[in-house]
Image (cartoon, grey):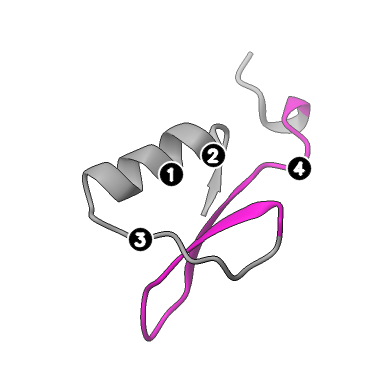
Amino acid sequence: MKTYSVDASQAFHEHYLGLVRSQAGPPHAIVFETKPIVFALSTWRNRRRYAVR
C-alpha cells in the first residue's frame, strides 16, 4: 500500500491491527508477516505529483 508517512502507517498497522513486521523485503518498504498474501507499505515516489493543492 502506498502512503505518505511510512512510519505513521507502520505504527498504526502494528498497534491497532496487530501486524508483525517481517525482516524480509526491500529496504524502501515495510513488509508484514501476513499469509497467504504479502502486505507491504511504501512511499509515493513522486510526492509533488500527488500533492493536494
Magenta run includes residue 39: yes
Tell which circle, 3 or 4, labels the residue nearer the N-terminal end. 3
Task: Give the side of residue 21 with respect to residue 48, left or right.
Answer: left
Mark 3 sits on what residue? 20
Residue 41 position in % (x across, y down): 53, 53
Q: Which residues are magenta?
A: 27-48
SS state under label 2: helix
Q: Residue at x 54, y 39 (%)?
A: 6
Q: Residue 3's quadrant in the figure? A: top right
User: Residue sitting at 31 percent across and 59 percent down?
Assistant: 19
* Residue at mark 2: 6
Instruction: Name the residue type under label 3.
Output: Val
* Residue 46 sits above or below residue 41 on the image: above
Q: Are marks 1 and 2 in contact (CB under 8 Å)?
A: yes
Residue linked to disc 4: 45
Of callouts 3 and 1, the N-terminal one: 1
Of all residues shown, which one is farthest toward the top? 53
